[in-house]
Amino acid sequence: MARYIKANPKVVAFLHLEDTRNQLQDGNYLLWQADMLELDMGSLVNLPAILDAIGGIALSAHEAREEQDGTVLRPLPVATDPRFIYTPPTSPQTQSPETGENAPQAAVEESEGQGISPEAESPAEGAETAQEGDQEESAGDGGGDEPENGEED
């Protein structure tokens, strides 16, 4: 099964793939398994050793999708090859998943999915029910008030 490779920007720059591969919210990239052949570190049979050298991780299609969506951001190990040792900058781009800047957008999407009609209808329905109850009580009270006042007999 083909795997996706999450790698740091130094690996992507070495391969000259900055413009052709997806950059993730944490600043790292998703590469294709076949991209590892361009590193001249051996065949894909040695993928675990290649990943150790570049400080990358192999992902299934589902895991790669989570990374793209930003729902899960897996940390990368430190590369053992000095060419690929990377220290991420402390810019707002790398901080955004941790600070939750995406949370307000998610909240907006959730409220859009629910719509405002259930919230708007609930008070109105409650008011209508209360009004109907008041009308029934007043009709009942009018009939009940007369015998209590003693006006009929």
Image (cartoon, grey):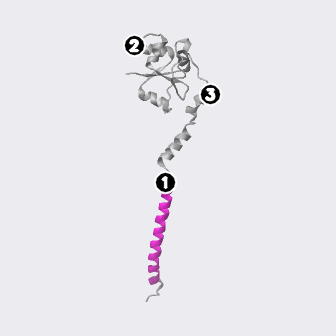
Q: Residue furthest bottom?
A: 153
Residue occupying image coordinates x 44% and y 72%: 136
Q: Is residue 94 above or below residue 106?
A: above
Which quarter of the rendering shows the N terminus?
top left
x and y, in percent, of residue 59 in the image:
44, 24
> Element type at marker 1?
helix
**Residue 139, labelled with which disc?**
none
- The span picked out in magenta is 119-147
State which tag comes first along the sequence, 2 or 1: 2
Percent of width and height locating residue 45:
39, 13
Residue type, mark 2 in image = Val
Work out which residue is located at the far left of the displayed protein and give it: 1
Residue toward you, 21 or 41: 21
Q: Is residue 120 magenta?
A: yes
Which residue matches tag 1?
117
Q: Which mark is residue 91?
A: 3
Three-letter residue code for mark 1: Ser
Count all numbered tags in the image, as a single digit: 3
Callout 2 secondary element: helix
Instruction: Give the position of the C terminus as an image quadrant.
Output: bottom left
As helix, strand or loop, the secondary structure at mark 3 comes to loop
Q: Amino acid at mark 3?
A: Ser
Identify the mark nearer the N-term, 1 or 3. Answer: 3
Seen at 49% across and 19% down, the residue is 56
